[in-house]
Image (cartoon, grey):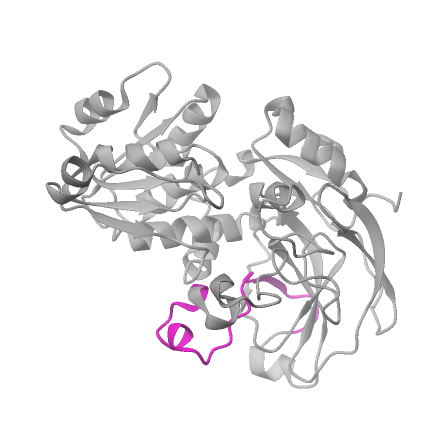
Amino acid sequence: MSLDSRTDAPAAQDAVRPGDVCRQVVFPAVGRVELAEALIPELGEDDLLLRVARVGICATDLHLLAGHIGEPFPLVPGHEFVGEVAALGANTAETRSLKQGDHVAVEMLLPCHRCPRCREGRYNLCDEDNPFRGLKQGRQYGVNIPRTAAPGLWGGYAEYLYVPGGATVHSIPESVPWDTAALTEPLAVAFRAVKRGRVGPGDTVVVIGPGPVGILTAAAARSAGASRIVMVGTRQSRLELATRFGADITVNSREQDAQQAVAEALGGPADVVIEMAGVAAAQEQAVQLARRGGRVVLAGACGAGVPVTFHEDEDLLLKEVDILPSFLSAGGFEPSISLLARGDFPFAELVTHRFGLGEVAHAFDVIRAREGGVIKAVLDPTDGALA
């Protein structure tokens, strides 16, 4: 459903209590989507309960449904969520400086805060979320925590979300509309990629992939001081939109030779290339578009088992490029919220569709078919009836 048929303001809510029933979307198995009910839990003294106002629909959610990312079923999907504080544990108001009704974003990863990677600030690589350790479940909301893990409110496709004391919570100014606030996590992914690429004043930057995160990456690179930004992709309407988010030049790689076009636009290869397309060909292209001694950030997930081919001498050795994978959004939430609050870019134009919880299957169909000029779709759990 398009945005013009709904209001942005959430409906008035009564106080929620332990034992109350809430709705959530569940992936019970590969290819299946259901609406279900869950009970509001008792909160521990350091916990809080989030009333979900918006949750972004991410390509990851579709890959999860298709079984491309493990089998964490039954799963409540959704990791791009924002909302308001619905209830607090006994200590939470003081320890987090929050009160009921505050607008917040919760980071999707629940770090252990103890392992070496967490202690060095790379909590996106937390040992307790390491898939190579054979763990029965991970610590990512909406991705690898099954609904069977108590209390079951582990995904944003729901009316309420359980937030334990160890979660990372950020306040959002109430001046930021919910649809815009829903971009917090994808923009944080963009900011992490920009940080990994060490983008700074005067750098020339190429972004490959004008999807929502790619477009937001142009905005993040511009805010970091990039002097010239080129967006490379295949969808002309998306490329044109990218120019409103910081891209100086666009290259349609179906119609132009990307290497030649980038060289002409920048006077040579780029200082930094950030790949957000999530396909092997784009990752291979990224190395080719970088200058000697440049940086290449690979942030688009291609899927398990997908090989990427680099030419050892021509692409790597003789150019001595830095290849920098960027995973998740650690460290990106604070600059993301700040940029959204400043409103330097027309963020509202990215969110083109909004759906209720009962419309998830239809929303996925719209996204797969690219209907109605869909760019970024969000769910509004306050709307839509249990089907």
Residue 357 makes an appearance in the image: yes
153 lies above or below 293: below
Asked whether, in this view, residue 168 is left or right of residue 119, the answer is right
Asked whether, in this view, residue 33 is left or right of residue 273, the answer is right
Magenta stretch bounds: 99-124
265 lies above or below 310: above
Indicate the quadrant containing the C terminus: top left, top right, bottom left or bottom right: top right
Query: Which percent across, then down, holds residue 328?
Result: 46, 55
Query: Which percent across, then down, holds residue 70?
Result: 60, 52
The structure residue drawn at horizontal position 27% and vertical position 23%, both measured from the top left corner, is: 258
16 lies above or below 313: below
Query: Which percent across, then down, holds residue 386?
Result: 88, 47
Asked whether, in this view, residue 191 is left or right of residue 159, the answer is left
Residue 208 makes an appearance in the image: no
The structure residue drawn at horizontal position 41% and vertical position 48%, both measured from the top left corner, is: 190
Indicate the quadrant containing the N terminus: top left, top right, bottom left or bottom right: top right
291 lies above or below 105: above
Quarter residue 12 falls in:
bottom right
Q: Main secondary structure of the magenta part?
A: loop
Whether residue 240 appears in magenta in the rendering, the answer is: no
